[in-house]
Image: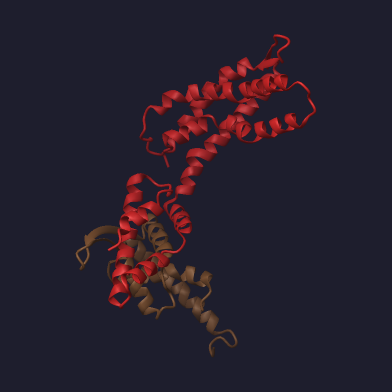
C-alpha cells in the first residue's frame, strides 16, 4: 500500500513520462500507467482529469479530439515542447529522491 | 449501453465553468466511463456489474467537481469576479458612511409620530449608484457573469441582509416590547433603511453594466 501523498506527487511524473512516448486519450493513459506500474499507480476519473486539465493549462500538454481505434471520438493528449523540458528535471528530482531513500538504513533491503 | 454522456452531464451540472467547457469535459469523461464499461464487459462482467464498476471507478462526484474547479481555475476566477470586488465595494460603502457622518453630512430623520423615526442617509444613498457601477465594472473587467456583476454591486447590503438583519431582528423580537405593531414598523423601517434603499441605489448604478451578457475579456 502506497501513501496517497506519495502517489499524488508521482502522478504528474507518470502522466508526463507515458505521454512522452506517444499521445493517448484519458482511459488508455490510465490503463497504461496501471499496467506499467503493476497496479501500484491507478488513476480514476476523479484523479486523472483534474491533473490532465491542470497540465494542459500549464502548457505541458495539448489535447485534441481524434477518432480512436474503436471508432469513438476521444481527446488525445500529447506532450508539448514545454512539457518535455519540464519532464527531464522532474525525472532527475525523483531519481535523486529514490536514491536518497535507498541510502537510509533498512530501506534498501526492504 | 448506458447513456454515459447524460449521466456525467447530470453529475457535472454544478461545475462552475463556461457551458461549452462543461460539455467538453462531460463528453470526455463519458468516453472514459464508456471505455471502462466496455473493458469490464470484455473481462466477463455482466452489463449490470460493468456499469456498477464504471460508476464506482469515478469516485465521489462532489469531489470530482471540486477537483475540476480547482484544475480549471474556477475558484481563483470567482475570487476575482465576485469576492474581491464585492468586499472592496462593501468596505468603501462603509467607509463612506462613516466619513460622511464625520463631516456632518450623515442622515436626515423623517418622523411622523406616532410612527417610529426613519433615518435617511441621503448623501450616502446618492453616492451608492457610483459604487454599484464601479463594482459591476470591476467584475465585468475580470470576466464576471451578469449575476456576478449584480452580486458585486449589491454586496454592501448582502451582509446586513444575510447576517446583521436577521440577528438584529431576533434580538429586537427577544426584547419585552408590548406593542407588536410598532415593533413590526421598526423592523420594516430598518429593512428599508439598511437593505432595500441601498440595494436599489447600488443596483441602479450597476444597471448600465448588465446589458452585455458576454463578459469582457479579463485583463489578466
Count numbered badges in the picture: 0
- Corner quadrant of residue A59: bottom left
Determine if residue A96 is in view: yes
Q: Position of residue B173 (x, y in %)?
A: 73, 30
Is residue B41 depicted above or below B132 in this figure? below
Q: Quadrant of the N terminus of chain B?
A: bottom left
Q: Residue at x 45, y 58 (%)?
A: B61
Horizontally, is A46 left or right of A71 in the view?
right
Residues B185 and B106: in front is: B185
Residues B66 and B78: in front is: B66
As drawn, the residue found furthest toward the top would be: B112
Is residue A80 depicted above or below B134 in this figure? below
Q: Quadrant of the C terminus of chain B?
A: top left
Q: Position of residue B116 (x, y in %)?
A: 72, 15
As drawn, the residue found furthest toward the bottom would be: A109
Q: How is the image coloured?
A: by chain
- Corner quadrant of residue A38: bottom left
Residues B93 and B46: in front is: B46
Q: Residue at x 38, y 35 (%)?
A: B215
- Corner quadrant of residue B51: bottom left
Q: Residue at x 41, y 28 (%)?
A: B210
Is residue A4 depicted above or below B11 in this figure? below
Q: Position of residue B139 (x, y in %)?
A: 46, 35
Question: In the rendered image, what is the letter of the chain coloured brown?
Answer: A
Residues B40 and B17: in front is: B40
Q: Position of residue A10 (x, y in %)?
A: 46, 71
For chain B, what colour was chosen? red
As drawn, the residue found furthest toward the right would be: B176
Determine if residue A78 is in view: no
Q: Residue at x 42, y 36 (%)?
A: B145
Amino acid at each position: 500500500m502506497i501513501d496517497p501523498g506519495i502517489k499524488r506527487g508521482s502522478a504528474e511524473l507518470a502522466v508526463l513520462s507515458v505521454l512522452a512516448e506517444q499521445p493517448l486519450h484519458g482511459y488508455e493513459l490510465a490503463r497504461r500507467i496501471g499496467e506499467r506500474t503493476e497496479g501500484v499507480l491507478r488513476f480514476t476519473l476523479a484523479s486523472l482529469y483534474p491533473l490532465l486539465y491542470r497540465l494542459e493549462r500549464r502548457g505541458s500538454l495539448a489535447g485534441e479530439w481524434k477518432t480512436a481505434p474503436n471508432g469513438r471520438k476521444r481527446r488525445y493528449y500529447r506532450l508539448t515542447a514545454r512539457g518535455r523540458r519540464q519532464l527531464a528535471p522532474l525525472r532527475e528530482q525523483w531519481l535523486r529522491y529514490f536514491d536518497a531513500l535507498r541510502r537510509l538504513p533498512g530501506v534498501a533491503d526492504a | 449501453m448506458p447513456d454515459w454522456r447524460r449521466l456525467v452531464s447530470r453529475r457535472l451540472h454544478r461545475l462552475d465553468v463556461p457551458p461549452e467547457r462543461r460539455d467538453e469535459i462531460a463528453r470526455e469523461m463519458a468516453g472514459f466511463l464508456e471505455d471502462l464499461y466496455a473493458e469490464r464487459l470484455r473481462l466477463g462482467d455482466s452489463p449490470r456489474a460493468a456499469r456498477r464498476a464504471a460508476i464506482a471507478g469515478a469516485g465521489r462526484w462532489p469531489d470530482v467537481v471540486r477537483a475540476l474547479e480547482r484544475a480549471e481555475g474556477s475558484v481563483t476566477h470567482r475570487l476575482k469576479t465576485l469576492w474581491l470586488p464585492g468586499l472592496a465595494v462593501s468596505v468603501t460603502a462603509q467607509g463612506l458612511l462613516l466619513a460622511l457622518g464625520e463631516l456632518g453630512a450623515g442622515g436626515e430623520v423623517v418622523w411622523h409620530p406616532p410612527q417610529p423615526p426613519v433615518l435617511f442617509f441621503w448623501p450616502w444613498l446618492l453616492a451608492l449608484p457610483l459604487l454599484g457601477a464601479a463594482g459591476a465594472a470591476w467584475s465585468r473587467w475580470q470576466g464576471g457573469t451578469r449575476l456576478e456583476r449584480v452580486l458585486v454591486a449589491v454586496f454592501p447590503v448582502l451582509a446586513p441582509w444575510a447576517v446583521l438583519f436577521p440577528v438584529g431582528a431576533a434580538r429586537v423580537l427577544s426584547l419585552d416590547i408590548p406593542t407588536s405593531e410598532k415593533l413590526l414598523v421598526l423592523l420594516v423601517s430598518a429593512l428599508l433603511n439598511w437593505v432595500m434603499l441601498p440595494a436599489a441605489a447600488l443596483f441602479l448604478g450597476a444597471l448600465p453594466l448588465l446589458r452585455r451578457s458576454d463578459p469582457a475579456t479579463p485583463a489578466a
